[in-house]
Image (cartoon, rainbow, N blue to C red):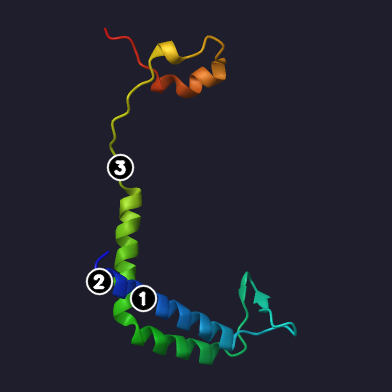
Amino acid sequence: MKKVDLLHLISIKSFLTKQTELLDEYASKNEDGSYVTKNDGIALANPIKYSSSLEILKDEYKEVIDAQDALNKKFETFLKSDIKFKFDPIPKKYIPATIKVSQMHDIFLLIEQPKS
């Protein structure tokens, strides 16, 4: 791993840790200390202060966040891209005589076809 990559990982981890600390600071909590949830999210005791504090934090880590966003977009593009690989078909001699029709249907395209 390159040093730059390691520095990025350390920085993004630092940002996420501070973001979690902010959420913990401004979250509404039950008597037992657990978070109050609202609409499948965490309810905030003071949403305005949380938002302004989060914006300050995002400004502080702007370069790291932008770099992470670029990495995320690159990864999403990769996931959507077609892949090519060579697959060696299964020789018919390895297909058991007791195979069910549904099983044969599932693997039909993987079986070696006779050469014409």
Q: Where 76 falls versus 67 (above or below)?
A: above
- Left or right, 29 with respect to 114, comes to right
- Residue wearing tag 1: 10
Q: Secondary structure at mark 3?
A: loop
Toward the top, the furthest residue is 116
- Left or right, 62 with respect to 96, comes to left
Q: Alpha carbon of mark 2 to alpha carbon of mark 1: how far?
A: 10 Å
Say the numbered circle drawn on residue 3: 2
Q: Alpha carbon of mark 3 to alpha carbon of mark 2: how far?
A: 31 Å
Q: Amino acid at mark 1?
A: Ile
Looking at the rendered image, the disc whose residue lies closer to the viewer, 3 or 1, is 1
Q: Alpha carbon of mark 3 to alpha carbon of mark 1: how far?
A: 32 Å
Residue at point 74% right, 82% down?
32
Q: Where 67 falls versus 48 (above or below)?
A: above
- Residue wearing tag 3: 82
Disc 3 to disc 2: CB gap under 8 Å: no
Disc 3 to disc 1: CB gap under 8 Å: no
